[in-house]
Image (tube, grey):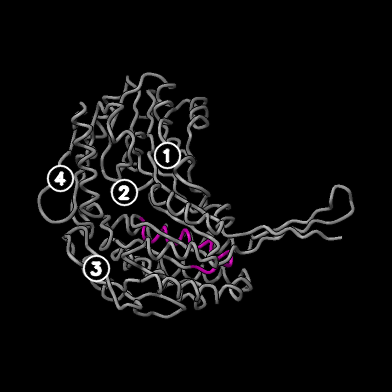
Amino acid sequence: MSEGAFETARTAVESVSKGLFVGGSWRDAEAGGAFAVEDPATGKTLCSVADATPADGMAALAAAVAAQASWAATAPRERGEILRRAHALLLARREEFAALMTAEMGKPIAESLGEVAYAAEFFRWFAEEAVRIGGDHAVAPDGGSRFLVMRQPVGPSLLVTPWNFPMAMGTRKIGPAVAAGCTMVLKPAEQTPLSALALADVLREAGLPDGVLNVVPTSAPGPLVEPLLRDGRIRKLSFTGSTEVGRLLLGQSASQVLRVSLELGGNAPFIVFADADLDAAVEGAMLAKMRNIGEACTAANRFYAEAPIAEEFTRRLAERMGGLTVGPGLDPANQVGPLIDEAGRQKVAALVDDAVSRGATIRTGGSAPAGPGYFYPPTVLSGVPADARMRHEEIFGPVAPVTAFDTEEQALAWANDTEYGLVAYVYTRDLDRALRVSEALETGMVGLNRGVVSNPAAPFGGVKHSGLGREGGKVGIEEFLETKYVAMG
């Protein structure tokens, strides 16, 4: 086992700032509190970070409000160049940040290296979008006046990020806010605050003015976030997390009629038709299921394989998933790391037990190993019935339930039978079917003969209870811009 990543992680954890980042300075929490950050591979404490109180949240908001006017007036090229420098800094320290991320979140080091590159790309994409904020000019239909349409920053924004992609979800929100000219208060997930604190330091080094980005980790997010949403000075909420919490925040945002972007839960169907390239379908299934240990809102949650190839697809998928090596993510020999915490592991185990009790068959995996850490083996089940909980709930773990279907209509009915609508995956060689099914799926994104859809240059988001708005792509910056119309005589 290589000790390189373990030593890099130890150094990174020791060196990252562990205070609150408010108004361009590192400081302790007002009450002097701190909370522990856990290593999910061992269950042991990595370090402690400052525990922000509601008063700290208000101090961060005050700093953002104070910086808003001057930041909005900053030249778009200058805003873009700050993001460009931050992109370069992230890539230059890629190994350090990847080890830090794996230490606090658990994913394999190879995936963390990939996430740092992915995270950096949001900075590069929005560096280019900063100078492309447009407007419009037109003559009124009656010829009596002129229309001038301009785009201006929304204003101080609250960004709430999840633990599963702790760096990329930060840059996916920070990038467009910086490009648009918005100041920010960032509340990272309490399980993974270190990546967000490292990002703050990168942006400070890249030249981001004081007060534009403020980072307030806390062990009590509800009491900190709600007063910010009800304050009136915050003008935008961008949240990534569970649908349950998203609904709550949407209600709180209503009191001030905030602009809201929500990227919420998923229940992604993965449909394999009999005419599909089965090798490609299995490879895509591995990506769609096992990326990030299955702890992703885009993870394939329900596998539907057409009856003639269902058994062969299941056999191959079980063989591939059963062959993966499970262990601490900092060991490069391991392909599957731990889940984020014991509650997450217990949920996955309960969903598997429920499916088996209803008649599903375990093809590989199916029981948590003994020992430290929150590990759960890659698991494949066949014959998963319609009343199994995992057909309706987000698994968020390395479990693939497979069900055979008979007709295209049946597959679509099953795929759309959910309150969620983030992403779906379809494998077929029939072009007409590919377009027909893609149009009929009630999701914001479709992976057509592809197991990964995420790309900074593409609009990411869902429909139904999977969220509001889009992140990334040309529309990503729109979420942080207001439209103003000027009528000219």
Which amino acid does the dot numbered 4 rest on? Ala
Q: Which residues are magenta?
A: 165-184
- Percent across and percent down for residue 194 are 32, 68
Dot placed on the residue nearer the N-terminal end, 3 or 1? 3
Residue corresponding to mark 4: 368
Crowdedness near tag 3: few (<14), some (14–19) or many (≥20) residues, C-alpha within 10 Å: some
Mark 2 against mark 3, which lies toward the viewer?
3
Answer whether labels 3 and 1 touch (C-beta < 8 Å). no
- Mark 1–mark 4 distance (CA, rounded to whole Å): 28 Å
Q: Earlier in the sequence, mark 2 or mark 3?
A: 3
> In the figure, residue 329 lies in which quadrant?
bottom left
Q: Is residue 180 magenta?
A: yes
* Distance in Å between CA atoms under marks 2 and 4: 16 Å
Q: Which residue is mark 1?
A: 420
Does residue 420 appear left or right of residue 134 in this picture? left
SS for callout 4: loop
Q: Are marks 2 and 3 in contact (CB under 8 Å)?
A: no
Choose between 31 and 117: the one closer to the eye: 31
- Residue hosting label 2: 295
